[in-house]
C-alpha cells in the first residue's frame, strides 16, 4: 500500500483516513500466546535497527513488527528461524509500503555488520520460501493499518496557535511544531517495544502518541476539542494507552540520566554494535520470564487534561504472568525448511534497549 507523496494533505486524505479506520476494525485478533514472547522485544529492535539502516518509512517498520507479532502468535518458531522470519517480515513490509528502489537488496542485507555479528547468511531461496509462507499465512493481504499510518494524518492538527504553553500563549510556534513531531515519533516507536499496545486499535495508539506529546510539552488543554473531533476519541478513552506511554517515557528519562552520570564518572568503554544507548544481548532476553500478553500492572497515573508541568506522580511496579491465558489455543510448530546458515555466537548480537530516535527529543 504505497501512498504516493503526503497523502494526508491531498484531496482524498479524509477518504483514505476513513478507509483505514474501517479496516482496523477487521484486523486479526492478537492472543499473545507465542512461546517465544519473551524474545519479541529483541526481534522488534532488530527490525528497527535494520529499518533505520535502510531509511525505511515508519509505516514499513510498524507493519513489519505487526506481521512478526501475528506470525509468532500462530507458530512455535525456533530462535534461529526467528531471525529469518523477522527479516522476511521487514522485506515484505518494505515491498508493500516503499518504492521498489528503496527495498533492501539481499546482498546489502548480508553485508550489514549486525548480520556478521550473528553469523547469519540469508539465501535467495530461503527468503522466497519464508515470504511465501508469510503471504499464505496472511492470505496475501498485507493491508493492515498500524499507528504509523494514522500519526501523519494527526500531525498537522497536533499544535495550534490557540494552544497555551504553561498557561501562556506560545512564543515560537515553529519550534513547538518541531518538538511535537519529534515527541510524537518517539512515542510511536515506544509503542513498538511492548506487545501490550496491541490491546488498543492503531488509531487510538496514534492519538495517544499525540496526546502524550502535548502533555510532555506542557500544552493546554492536553486534548483540545479539535483533536477529539478529528480522532473521535475522548481523553478518557485514551487514558490507559497514554499512561503506558508516559510510564515508558519516565523510565527512559531515568535511564538516560543514569547513563549520563555513569559516563561522566567512568572512562569511555568499547561497546558492541550499535553504539548508541544501552545494549541488551539475546541471552538476556532468554533469561527473562516468559511474559504474556497482558504483562504490566500499572499503578494509577495522574495526568491532567489541562496540561500540567508535573504530569506524572506514580510508583509503578511491572509484573509478568507466567501462566498462559485461559482458553488460548497453543500455536503450531513451524516446520518450514530454512536455507539460512545461522550460528548463534557466545556473545550474541547486541541491540539497542532505547531507540536512537529518543535522543533528539531530550536535552540530556
Image (cartoon, helix red, strand yellow):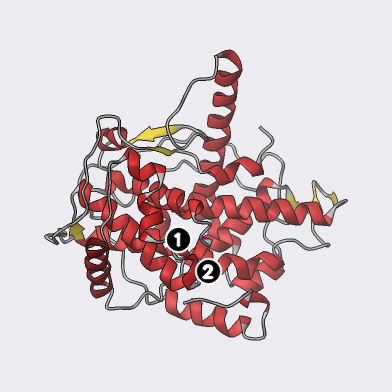
Label 2 neighbourhood size at 10 Å, few (<14), some (14-19), many (20+)?
A: many
Asked if disc 2 and disc 1 are in contact, CB closer than 8 Å, the reply is: yes
Residue appearing at x 30%, y 37% in the figure: 282
Residue appearing at x 66%, y 64% in the figure: 155
Residue on which disc 2 sits: 149
Q: Position of residue 65 (x, y in %)?
A: 39, 58
Label 2: which secondary element: helix
As measured in the structure, the alpha-carbon distance from the residue carrying label 2 to the one carrying label 1 is: 9 Å
Q: Position of residue 210 (x, y in %)?
A: 62, 58
- Total labels: the figure holds 2
Label 1 neighbourhood size at 10 Å, few (<14), some (14-19), many (20+)?
A: many
Label 1: which secondary element: helix
Residue on which disc 1 sits: 62
Q: Relative to the observer, which residue lies in front, 197 or 354?
A: 354
Q: Position of residue 114 (x, y in %)?
A: 38, 43
- 117 over 83 or under it: above or below: above
- 208 over 27 or under it: above or below: above
**Mark 2 or mark 1, which has the lower sequence index?**
1
Amino acid at each position: 500500500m504505497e501512498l504516493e507523496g503526503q497523502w494526508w494533505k491531498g484531496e482524498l486524505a479524509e477518504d483514505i483516513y476513513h478507509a483505514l479506520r474501517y479496516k482496523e476494525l477487521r484486523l486479526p485478533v492478537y492472543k499473545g500466546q507465542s512461546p517465544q514472547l519473551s524474545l519479541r522485544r529483541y526481534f522488534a529492535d532488530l527490525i528497527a535497527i535494520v529499518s533505520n539502516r535502510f531509511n525505511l518509512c515508519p509505516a514499513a517498520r510498524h507493519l513489519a513488527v505487526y506481521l512478526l507479532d501475528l506470525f509468532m502468535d500462530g507458530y512455535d518458531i525456533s530462535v534461529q528461524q526467528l531471525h529469518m522470519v523477522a527479516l522476511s517480515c521487514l522485506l515484505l513490509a518494505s515491498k508493500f509500503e516503499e518504492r521498489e528502489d528503496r527495498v533492501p537488496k539481499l546482498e546489502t542485507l548480508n553485508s550489514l555488520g549486525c548480520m556478521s555479528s550473528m553469523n547469519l547468511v540469508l539465501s535467495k531461496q530461503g527468503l522466497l520460501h519464508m515470504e511465501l509462507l508469510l503471504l499464505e499465512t496472511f492470505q496475501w493481504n498485507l493491508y493492515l493499518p498500524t499507528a504509523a499510518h494514522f500519526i501523519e494524518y494527526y500531525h498537522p492538527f497536533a499544535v495550534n496557535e490557540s494552544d497555551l504553553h504553561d498557561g501562556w500563549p506560545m512564543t515560537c510556534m515553529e519550534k513547538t511544531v518541531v518538538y511535537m513531531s519529534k515527541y510524537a515519533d518517539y512515542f510511536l516507536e515506544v509503542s513498538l517495544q511492548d506487545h501490550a499496545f496491541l490491546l488498543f486499535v492503531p488509531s487510538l495508539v496514534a492519538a495517544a502518541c499525540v496526546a502524550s506529546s502535548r502533555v510532555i510539552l506542557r500544552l493546554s488543554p492536553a486534548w483540545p476539542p479539535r483533536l477529539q473531533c478529528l480522532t473521535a476519541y475522548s481523553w478518557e478513552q485514551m487514558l490507559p494507552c497514554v499512561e503506558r506511554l508516559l510510564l515508558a517515557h519516565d523510565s527512559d528519562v531515568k535511564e538516560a540520566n543514569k547513563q549520563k552520570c555513569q559516563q561522566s564518572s567512568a572512562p569511555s568503554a568499547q561497546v558492541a554494535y550499535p553504539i548508541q544507548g544501552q545494549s541488551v544481548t539475546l541471552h538476556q532476553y532468554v533469561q527473562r520470564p516468559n511474559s504474556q500478553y497482558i504483562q504490566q500492572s500499572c499503578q494509577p497515573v495522574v495526568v491532567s487534561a489541562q496540561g500540567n508541568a508535573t504530569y506524572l506522580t506514580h510508583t509503578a511496579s511491572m509484573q509478568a504472568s507466567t501462566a498462559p491465558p485461559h482458553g488460548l489455543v497453543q500455536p503450531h510448530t513451524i516446520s518450514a525448511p530454512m536455507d539460512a546458515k545461522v550460528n548463534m555466537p557466545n556473545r550474541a548480537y547486541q541491540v539497542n534497549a532505547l531507540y536512537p530516535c529518543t535522543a533528539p527529543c531530550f536535552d540530556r
